[in-house]
Image (tube, rainbow, N blue to C red):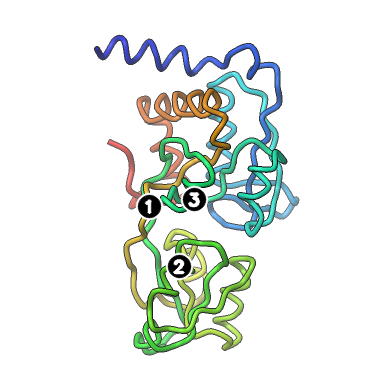
């Protein structure tokens, strides 16, 4: 049975003639470090850029990156403006009603409440909480008694805390940790809470079953040889949860 499974994975890993001959457009936000962001040379870099390039190479796919704002990233996938989403997107049931997801390439990231140092933790329930629009965290805040204020970009949520528009921000812990560590004590975590979802995954159109199978095989290959775990540790540190 294991041999048959490995054979099937090898077949899926090698892109079919049709896939191999087309350019696969990889949609990303380019504003969510360390997942994906623009460096000083205005080049897309980050964990997902390295991973996406590695997956495409293993699957013998020709890929190019397309930058798109988070707010419209799912509608533009469905509309055909690109073929995948790799943008720190958690595979949730609500999103799965609209698009398909690959197997996860990062285990679910807990969410963190971040605020100015010395902020009373009670703001998590009674204060104004910033979150990026159309995120799991925005939905989480909406289910509490706190006041939700949404922003199109993650950077704007950080600015809202710094300028006093919001008491705290709720976002992926691994996104916020860099801001906390580089703030010289200005910012701190109030709490870390679980995030619902199957994990960070590639988003695809529901009709693209062959492309999904191809990426799943490449993800499984990188899990099996340890290279995915190596990338996770490179970008998120030694404490990041990895695949067994």
Among numbered discs 3 and 2, the one appearing first in the sequence: 3
Mark 2 lies on residue: 139
Which element carries disc 3, helix, strand or loop?
Answer: helix
Residue furthest out toward the left: 1
Q: Residue at x 53, y 43 (%)?
A: 99
Specify few, some or many for label 2: CA neighbours under 10 Å numbering under 14, 14-19, or 20 or more. Answer: few
**Quarter that holds the N terminus:** top left
Mark 3 lies on residue: 95
Among numbered discs 1 and 3, the one appearing first in the sequence: 3
Closest to the observer, 219 or 139: 139
Mark 1 lies on residue: 197
Image location of residue 179, percent across then percent down: 51, 68
Q: Are the two marked residues, 3 and 2, in contact with CB atoms closer than 8 angstroms?
A: no
Specify few, some or many for label 3: CA neighbours under 10 Å numbering under 14, 14-19, or 20 or more. Answer: some
Among numbered discs 1 and 2, the one appearing first in the sequence: 2
Between the residue at mark 3 and the residue at mark 2, the CA separation in whole angstroms equals: 13 Å
Q: Is residue 75 left or right of residue 4?
A: right
Q: Is residue 140 above or below residue 17?
A: below
Q: Residue at x 71, y 26 (%)?
A: 23
The label on residue 6 is: none
Q: Residue at x 51, y 29 (%)?
A: 212
Which element carries disc 1, helix, strand or loop?
Answer: loop
Instruction: Residue 31: name its quadrant.
Output: bottom right
Residue furthest out toward the right: 41
Which element carries disc 2, helix, strand or loop?
Answer: helix
Please state the total of marks drawn on the protein image.
3
Q: Residue at x 61, y 77 (%)?
A: 159
Q: Is residue 166 above or below residue 32?
A: below
């Amino acid at each position: 049975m294991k041999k048959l499974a490995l054979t099937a994975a090898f077949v899926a890993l090698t892109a079919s003639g049709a896939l191999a001959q087309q350019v696969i457009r990889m949609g990303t936000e380019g504003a969510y470090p360390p997942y994906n962001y623009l460096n000083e040379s205005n080049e897309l870099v980050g964990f997902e850029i390295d991973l996406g390039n590695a997956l495409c190479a293993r699957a013998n796919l020709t890929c190019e990156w397309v930058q798109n704002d988070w707010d419209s990233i799912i509608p533009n996938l469905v509309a055909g403006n690109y073929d995948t989403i790799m943008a720190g997107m958690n595979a949730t049931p609500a999103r799965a009603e609209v698009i398909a997801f690959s197997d996860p390439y990062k285990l679910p990231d807990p969410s963190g409440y971040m605020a100015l140092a010395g902020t009373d933790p009670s703001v998590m329930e009674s204060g104004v909480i910033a979150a990026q629009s159309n995120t799991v965290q925005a939905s989480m805040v909406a289910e509490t008694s706190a006041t939700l204020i949404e922003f199109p970009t993650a950077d704007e949520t950080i600015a809202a805390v710094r300028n006093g528009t919001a008491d705290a921000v709720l976002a992926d812990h691994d996104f916020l940790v860099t801001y906390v560590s580089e703030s010289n004590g200005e910012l701190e975590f109030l709490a870390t809470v679980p995030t619902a979802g199957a994990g960070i995954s590639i988003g695809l159109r529901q009709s693209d079953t062959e492309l999904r199978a191809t990426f799943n095989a490449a993800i499984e290959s990188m899990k099996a040889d340890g290279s995915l775990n190596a990338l996770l540790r490179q970008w998120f540190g030694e404490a990041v949860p990895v695949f067994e």
